[in-house]
Image (tube, coloured by chain):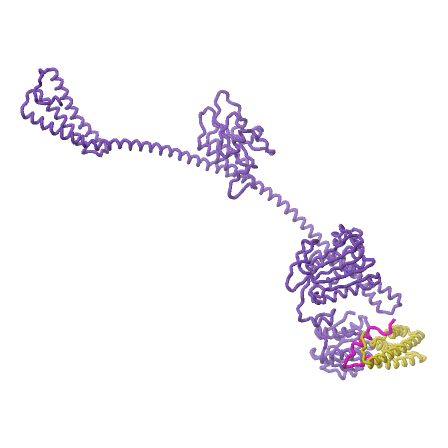
Chain colours: A purple, B yellow
Amino acid sequence: MESCNCIEPQWPADELLMKYQYISDFFIALAYFSIPLELIYFVKKSAVFPYRWVLVQFGAFIVLCGATHLINLWTFNMHSRTVAIVMTTAKVLTAVVSCATALMLVHIIPDLLSVKTRELFLKNKAAELDREMGLIRTQEETGRHVRMLTHEIRSTLDRHTILKTTLVELGRTLALEECALWMPTRTGLELQLSYTLRQQNPVGYTVPIQLPVINQVFSSNHAVKISPNCPVARLRPLAGKYMPGEVVAVRVPLLHLSNFQINDWPELSTKRYALMVLMLPSDSARQWHVHELELVEVVADQVAVALSHAAILEESMRARDLLMQQNIALDSARREAETAIRARNDFLAVMNHEMRTPMHAIIALSSLLQETELTPEQRLMVETILKSSNLLATLINDVLDLSRLEDGSLQLQIGTFNLHAVFREVLNLIKPIASVKKLLVALNLAPDLPEYAVGDEKRLMQTLLNVVGNAVKFTKEGNISITGFVAKSESLRDSRAPEFFPVPIENHFYLRVQVKDSGSGISPQDIPNLFTKFAQNQAIALRNSSGSGLGLAICKRFVNLMEGHIWIESEGLGKGCTAIFIVKLGIPEHSNDSNLSFIPKMPVHGQTNFPGLKVLVMDENGVSRSVTKGLLLHLGCDVMTVSSVEECFRVVSHEHQVVFMDVCVPGIDGYEVAVHIHDKFTRRHERPLIVALTGSTDNLTKDNCMRVGMDGVILKPVSLEKMRSVLSDLLEHRVLFESM
Amino acid sequence: MGYVDDQFSQLHKLQDESSPDFVVEVASLFFDDAEKLINSMARALEQPCVDFKQVDSHVHQLKGSSSSIGALRVKNVCIAFRSFCDAQNREGCMRCLQQVSHEYTMLKSKLQTLFRMEQQILAAGGSVPLE
């Protein structure tokens, strides 16, 4: 454009130059016109172009530049003033537009450039997202594989199936060439090839467990790449020149039931591991990817769990079978025991009856014999017979008691009794023998020992008598001391009786009795056997009463029933012996104590006096009549006496509550009276009670009395106590037939 | 063997303020009764034809009385006497009668001594133990 001016050139117009200029201008113009056309065309084609007005501006600029060049074509020759003006206008416009465009471009070009950077940025982002997508997809794939594998593995509880399935599925999922499982042997020193994928029957390869590569695998819970040349990976003969595929090994923890903690996956070092080896196909140039390794690790863990479930199941099945067998054994044992018990009970019942019948006959007849006239020697003999048969009867009772005690069917007969009297009674019983042996017997009862207690009097006395009797029996000389006191809780616990835990309870106290003798003593090793029944040791046979071995055993059972404890202390042979027992007794209520002091052996109920009781006594014998009258008067009765049957008939009235009649008379007059009275008083509550006093002990008298309707029969002589109890029983029960 | 048995002490138990001489009274009754019976028995046995039934009933009475008072020896003789009566053995009965009489006399003298002594003690202001 520099050359575009209207001034004639100074040098001669070169026609060639002119021509070239002419052509160039023409082409420039053409280009300038075509560029906007192209721009418009392509912009129209594209969807997005934010700068349309820039384009217009640019187009205008280019068009004007083209126009300028085009008009320049006419300025090479002489041109008119119009052309000059047009040229000038065009140039001015062009200048304006190009300056505007230049100014505008300053704004636009940075924008355009930044568009480019943004595009680059977005492209990067897209590439990154693509990558991540790929990752997620692979992970999801892996997850799917794992789920499927787990499902396969866990769908069975059989150990072999689990392992086989694992290998098969892993092989399929990861397209493995070979997959193998090495299990530790029993000794734990070697790994044995147990399962493989491709080989059907793995021969028992073993590998020592202490290889460094194995240790490396076992020490981490990740899948570890190992060399294909290590012994665990050399499973098949190498195919020569090909590159073996990469091998990965992972540990599979073998969990035992005891290893399970709730909250953490155990990491104990005493664990056993199996080794799973996975081989990629050889010369596939495949590499182990991270997600594949993760898959393998997860599968290994799942397998561990599945295996332990299988193990637990096996255990529990085995335990259940064992229990069933034990159940059957126990059942049959129980049935045998029941049969045995039944047999024994039958035997005892029969023997009991069989033994007691003759015993009863012996005792009854001997006591009857005692009542007849005998010479002194005969009397002594009969007394001895009676004593011995009583002893025998006691023994029979003991055996029965003991078997009942063992059954647990014996129950204590609880009642209120005089505790001090029990001790005194035992003392009285033992005194004769002790004095014969010249032994000193001392009884010492603590002052705080209650006089009355609630318990089984008979059995307590039996126990005490047994213990004291033993002491007397086995002491040749010296003394025997019996002490009884209330045991406080400290003294209740004894080192010898660690299982004995007495608990102090209200209304109960523990009675402690110690019987110390200076006799032959017992050696300490014999002491535990003392209370075992039928123990055969010589010393024990001596110590146990009546040589049968039952006495102390029974005592022990009685004492146990009374929630107590019995034991014997001895310092050795010849050093004497102390028997100690503690029993639990109840403390009685205070209300009915007064009655007991009068009648220690009588039943608790009973009146001491019968004030105003109207009684009629009929007796032909003056002496016995006055004695009976005296008895009844002493008891506070209102007594009327008659000495004959006729008088009795006349006098008897409904005011009399009891009629005592002596029926010793050989005649049957007494019976007539009874009949008469029955006829006279038809209503039962008006009729006096009729009691026969007789000296004869035969059943005939008793039967006669009962036949004529008497309410009671009493054997003469009648003591005061007897009369008292008779009257109270009579009035309470309205009948009394004393055993003859 | 003792003259009296437990029954005698039972009688003592019946003695109280309301009947202070109970024992003495009963003993006196017994003495009268026994003498009468013994005489009857003697008379019956002297008959040429002895009525053993009657003798037996007397003996029975005596036995009852003696057991009521607790005269042990008398009672035992009576028991033997009865068996002789049942056997209708006159000799045995005579012997027994003699024995009874003898025992009775002994008893009576002893008891009378006892009662006299008791009275002396009571008069002197003491008390007689029951056992």
Q: Quadrant of residue A473?
A: bottom right
In this orientation, which residue lies closer to the viewer: A17 or A353? Answer: A17
**Placement of A509 over or under A300, stated as above or below:** below
Decide if residue A100 is on the left or right side of residue A170: left
Residue B122: give x, y in percent of width and height. 82, 80
Q: Quadrant of residue A506?
A: bottom right
Q: Quadrant of residue A18?
A: top left
Which residues lie in the magenta part?
B1-26
Residue B42: give x, y in percent of width and height. 92, 80
Instruction: Say if the magenta span includes residue A684.
Output: no
Residue B61: give x, y in percent of width and height. 85, 78
- Give me the residue at 46% from left, 34% from top: A294
Instruction: Say if the magenta span includes residue B20.
Output: yes
Residue B100: give x, y in percent of width and height. 90, 76
Decide if residue A59 is on the left or right side of residue A422: left
Q: Which image quarter is the C terminus of chain A in?
A: bottom right
